[in-house]
Image (cartoon, rainbow, N blue to C red):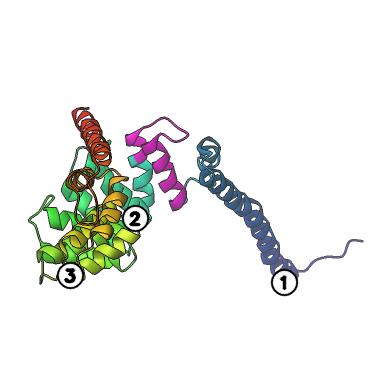
Amino acid sequence: MEPKMNKKNSCSILPEVLKIFFFSFFLLFGSAHANDISKGLHYYDINDYRKAYQYFIQPSARNNAEVQRRLGYMYSSGSGVGKDYSKAMEWYAKSAAQGNAHAQFDMGTLYEHGEGVKQNYEKAFQWYKYAAEKGYAPAQYNLGVFFEKGYGRSKDYQKAREWYQKAAEQGDANAISNLGVLYSRGLGGTQDYHKAFELYKKAAEKGDSAAQYNLAEYYRAGLATPRDLDKAIYWYEKSAVQGTIKAMDKLARIYQVGYKHIPANQTLSDQWAEKAQAARAKEQTGARK
C-alpha cells in the first residue's frame, strides 16, 4: 500500500519544486543569454562584425543596451551589415532609451550631421546633454562646441568653457585644446596666455593637431614662453603630418627665408609647399562631393 502524503507536506514541497524549476530555467536560458552577448562582443572587438551580428541579433542578446548601441554603430558604419542610417537610428534609440550614454551621444551625432534624419541642432544638443550629464566626455566636448559656435542657439563662451573644462578633466584632448583657445582669446572669461600655453602643451602631447599648431605659434612668437624656433618647427611638423595645411604653409615659409641658425632650404620649402597644395586640392574635392 502506497503511503499517503498529507496536505501539509504536499503544500510545503510544492514551493521547493517550483524554486528548483525556476532556478534551472534561469541557469539554462540566463547563461545562453550571457553567452550570446559575450560571444558577440568578442567578435565585435576583433572586428569580425558579421559573426558579431549573428550573436547580437539573437532574442537572448538584442535587448541589451550595449548590444543595441553596437548594432547601431554597425548599421551607421556599414560594418558587417549594409549601411543603413534608419536602422542605426532605430538601434541607437533603443539603447539610448535604456540610458546608455554612448548611444545618446550617437543619437546626437546623427541629428547634428543629418545622417538618416533631417539635420536638427536642437535635438542633437538635447541628446548630447543627456550623455554629458552622465559624465560622457565626448558629449561634454560637443556641448562646448555648440555653445562656442552657436549651433542652434546663441553663442555662450562661458558655458563653452564650463563644458570644455568638464571634458578636459577627463583627459579629452579636443576639449583641452579648445579650452586653450578660449583662454588665449579671453572668451568666456579672463585672457590668460600662460594658461593657454599650458593647455596647448598638454593637448599637443596627447596628439591634438590644432593644439600642436597653436603651441608652435606660441614658441615662434615667444608668447608665455621663451622664443624657440626649433620647438616651433618641431610642433609645426607634428601638426603638418596630421594634415594641418597652415602648419605646412608656415614650414614652407620658414625654410624659404631661413632664420638665424636655421638656414634657408629651398628643397624643404618646396616639399612643404607642394604638400600644402595637395592637401588643399583634396579638401576642395571633398567639399564638392
| Magenta span main SS | helix
Q: Quadrant of residue 269?
A: top left
Query: In the rendered view, does 144 fall on the left or right side of 36?
Result: left
Which residues are the magenta region?
Answer: 65-88
The residue that mark 1 highlights is 8
Q: Separation of disc 1 and disc 3 at Cα?
A: 87 Å
Q: Determine whether, in the image, residue 248 is placed left or right of residue 152.
A: right
The disc at residue 207 is 2
Expressed as whole percent of the image width and height from the top left, the position of residue 45 reads 52, 47
- The picture places residue 144, in percent across and down from the top left corner, at 20, 59
**What is the x, y in percent for residue 137?**
32, 61
Q: Is residue 56 magenta?
A: no
| Residue name at image x 63 percent, y 53 percent | 31
Report whether residue 120 is seen: yes
Q: What element carries label 3?
A: loop
Which numbered circle lies on residue 62? none
Camera-near label (2 vs 1) is 2
Residue 224, numbered circle: 3
Q: Is residue 131 visible?
A: no
Q: In which quarter of the image is residue 167?
A: bottom left
Q: Distance between the residues labelled 2 and 1?
A: 74 Å
Q: What residue type is labelled 3?
A: Ala
- For the point 24% across and 34% down, which residue is it? 274
From the viewer's side, name the closer residue of 47 and 258.
Answer: 258
Separation of residues labelled 3 and 2 (CA atoms): 21 Å
User: In the displayed image of the protein, which residue is found farthest to the right?
Assistant: 1
Q: Nearer the viewer, mark 3 or mark 2?
A: 3
Q: Is mark 1 on a helix, strand or loop?
A: helix
- The residue lying toward the viewer, choosing from 266 and 184, is 266
Dot 2 and dot 1 residues touching (CB under 8 Å): no
